[in-house]
Amino acid sequence: MAAHFGKLVAIDVKPGGPGDSQSGLNLLHPRIWGRLADEGCGRDLAFVVIHPSSNFHGHYLVGPLESRGCALLALNTRYAGNDTTLLMERCIQDLGAGVAFLRAQGYRKVVLIGNSGGGSLVSFYQSQAEKLTIRNTPDGRLIDLAPEDLPHLFERSYRGVEARQQRFGTGMGLAITKGLLAAEGGRVWAENHREGGAVFTIAVPAETRMAAALAGDSL
């Protein structure tokens, strides 16, 4: 199977500070860009390769992984070519947006790869994804990283920060719900509520609902 070198994808990210970009348009509607190489690849596994400030769209793993049936997202942060105002706290936020993008594409597992400065970035992300502790930058600026919980909601046994402080529950509920719905062709997804909390939406195909009604069951 020949690699086709992927396609360019745009991923929206949360606004940061005025020094994040020299482009007023990008500050108004911030996006990061990635190169997704997934031709002929399944949806079980995807890799992400990233660096805080280098352009990784031409990374040497893009072709070899895709040619072996492994999807790869070569992702740039908002600081590509601009390490003067770089904040690692924003970089892990951008990486989280990339992980969320892949989950929205249906990938069940995401593996992070980091070269050079990318190694410290993915390690920092993983530690904060497991237990979020960052509230501000080293110079005291507040930074909101709470939405980084979202890419992990449907991993087995994942529990949010508040839930981990409680002594009951296993964290399996969402994974079981997703599995049951997937068996019926349905899906469930989560979004932040603008007034706080979360909104969970369940979608079930009309054919499934009709079959259940005829069988006397309820959905």
Image: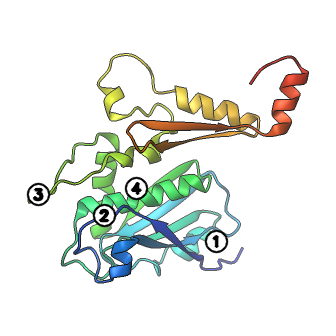
Q: Nearer the viewer, mark 1 or mark 4?
A: 4
First reached walking from the N terminus: tag 1 or tag 3? 1
Residue wearing tag 1: 67
Q: Secondary structure at mark 4?
A: helix
Disc 1/disc 3 C-alpha distance (Å)? 42 Å
Q: Eyeballing the image, is 183 above or below 99? A: above
Residue wearing tag 2: 91
Task: Out of 215 and 127, give the one closest to the viewer.
Answer: 215
The kind of residue tagged 4 is: Gly
Residue at 27% x, 73% y is 20
Numbered circle sitting on residue 96: 4
First reached walking from the N terminus: tag 2 or tag 4? 2
The kind of residue tagged 2 is: Cys
Disc 4/disc 3 C-alpha distance (Å)? 20 Å
x, y percent for residue 116: 29, 70
Looking at the rendered image, the quarter that the C terminus falls into is: top right
x, y percent for residue 43: 65, 54
Residue at 43% x, 19% y is 169
x, y percent for residue 70: 60, 62
Disc 1/disc 2 C-alpha distance (Å)? 29 Å
